[in-house]
Image (cartoon, rainbow, N blue to C red):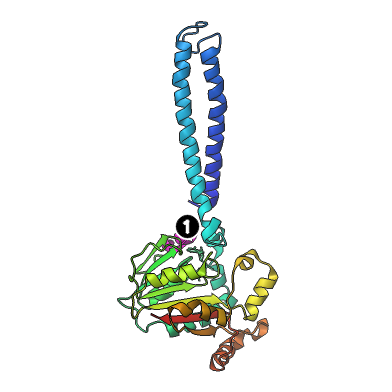
Amino acid sequence: MATGDRRLLKAAFSGVWRFLAWWGAMFAFLAGFGTTCPFCGQPGCPCGPASAGVLGGLFATGVFLTRWLGKRLGRESCKPAGHASKLDFDSLAGRYDRWYDAPEGALYDRLEKRAVARLLPRNGWGKELLDVGCGTGHWASFFSEHGFTIAGVDISPSMIRVARGKGIPRASFAIADAHELPFDSGRFDVAVAITTLEFVRDPEAVLWEMVRCTRRPGGLVLVGALNALAPINRRRKAAGKATYQEARFFSPRELKALLAPFGEARVTSAALVPQARWLLPLAPLTDALGRWLHLPYGALLVARVKL
Ligand SMILES: C[S@@+](CC[C@H](N)C(=O)[O-])C[C@H]1O[C@@H](n2cnc3c(N)ncnc32)[C@H](O)[C@@H]1O
């Protein structure tokens, strides 16, 4: 159920509970102390107080149930946005993939995927991959094309619903908080987080969880993060859009330091794209040049640690 629907239901339950409280109290009062019994119509008859007791009991049960249901629904709807994630992605789920479909987004996506593919094991067949903050399953499709069996987790129920709807082969998706991954230790060959650490409450804790779930020795932890030094990301921050205001972008040095407790991290920057639109066709060239010269200005930092 979408967050909006949940909020509506919560409001409805809260309305029902108020209605019951008001009319129940009125009825109980009239039944118990009023001059006329609501059942037999006799003034001051003994069934008045008795019926007041029964009605009061029913009323209390109704109030308890509606409040309990209202609270349950409310708690579930607030959880994703509240603490574990800096941003509630539920409201973005329906239009999230538009960026990848637009020509500029598709260009960045192609270059970023090339960079990630360079750090992945060449053959994913028979290997299990954990996709943390999998969103709409965009990257899960890519990992699936490389043969991996994927477990994707995300805290946003709507993102997970979109991911499930894609019917990606060998991929399963679950709602979970990256700070407490619901998997046994050492279960995965590869753990990946693409543009997720920017939005979690505690990136270090999430990395520890990813490492815990990855096979040791020999497993791989791979992180894709928005580069604080990239011109496109500077523009995004400056534009003041809520999505990016909340995000913590990383410099290559910060990402390396974040990964240092787990081993020597190889950090590269990908998708060095000219910012002027008319120069976009040169992107494959500028990207290749950036890689060759180790320029740290590409849009996405891609880092890998071998455990
Ligand atoms: C920018 S999106 C990236 C989605 C996907 N990896 C991609 O690149 O298309 C960040 C994702 O991280 C998820 N997220 C944020 N905090 C999370 C948390 N604590 N646990 C799990 N997922 C989280 C969000 O719901 C969102 O889907």
Q: Which residue is at a point 62% across and 84% down the rendered structure image?
A: 280
Find residue 26 and report its image quarter: top right
Q: Secondary structure under badge 1? A: helix
Front residue of 126 and 259: 259
Helix, strand or loop for the magenta stretch, by majority: helix
Q: Tell me the magenta residue range.
A: 154-166
- Residue 94 visible here: no
Near mark 1 (Cα within 10 A), the count class, few <14, some 14-19 or many ≥20, is many
- The image position of residue 35, as x and y in percent, is 55, 8
In magenta stretch: residue 192: no
Front residue of 32 and 157: 32
Q: Which residue is at a point 52% across and 79% down the rendered structure image?
A: 257
The outermost residue toward the front is 261
Q: Is residue 83 above or below residue 62?
A: below
Q: How many marks?
A: 1
What amino acid is found at the position of numbered circle 1 in the picture? Pro
Find residue 262 and report its image quarter: bottom left
**Picture quarter with the C terminus:** bottom left
- The image position of residue 102, as x and y in percent, is 58, 73
Q: Which residue is at a point 54% across and 84% down the rendered structure image?
A: 269
The outermost residue toward the left is 126
Q: Is residue 85 above or below residue 69?
A: below
- The image position of residue 10, as x and y in percent, is 53, 43
